[in-house]
Image (cartoon, helix red, strand yellow):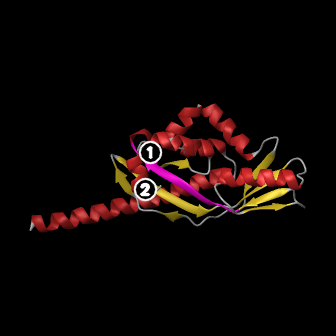
Amino acid sequence: MKFKIFPIVLILVSCFSSAQTIENLKIATKKIYDANYTMDFDGVANLTYPTIVEHFGRTKFLDKLDNDYQNEKYRMRIQLEKMVFQYGEIQKIENKTYCVITYRNPARYFYETKLDSNTSLIEANFLREKDQTKDVTFEPKRNSFNVRRISKLIAIADASTGNEWKFINMDDVEQRLQSKNILDETVKKQLGL
């Protein structure tokens, strides 16, 4: 009788553990999105995968985030307050847990100096490359660009994060570059990156 109960208990524990993991991931995902939306850069740094923050140093990472959102050239704002996140499969690979999260994440870039037709084309190409999208619209009356992009977060829980979910923001050029040092080819292949 004990042997029949053990597999059932094991299945229940596995299901409960999986449900806990996805619920914790949903909470953490909302937190990092909200931190980005409200420009709470300390909150973003706290939820970013530690290797990324260590690469820059916390102070430089915070300065970089501030510069990404507002600088002498433009001010960038995320447009939607609430998001619908698409969660990939949660995968355990080599003692780390991963999940790829995607969502529509339009942003608006307000330029500080008036753009003419030539500079607007240059800036549009810059934003297409930076945000990895072809859907960039210049609005001359507002001197701004509307950038419609599909954002991607790589969620990781491992020993370095205390098994809490932390994120690599693939919208960020520097984080994309650093992800190559964090995610080896096997992991990228299994995650479909």
Image side of residue 78 versus residue 3, left or right: right
- Residue 18 in the image: state x and y as whole percent: 36, 61
Q: Give me the C-alpha separation between circle 1 and circle 2.
A: 10 Å
Q: Earlier in the sequence, mark 1 or mark 2?
A: 1
Q: Residue flagged by tag 2: what amino acid is it? A: Leu
**Looking at the image, which is closer to me, 165 or 131?**
131
For label 2, the residue is 191
Image side of residue 124 versus residue 102, left or right: right
Name the main secondary structure of what is drawn in magenta.
strand
Is residue 6 highlighted in magenta?
no
Tell me, for residue 183, which label it has, or none: 1
Which portion, as a residue range, is magenta?
A: 148-158
**Looking at the image, which is closer to me, 85 or 162?**
85
**Looking at the image, which is closer to me, 152 or 27?**
152
- Residue 183 in the image: state x and y as whole percent: 44, 45
> For the view shown, which residue lies furthest in the front direction?
118
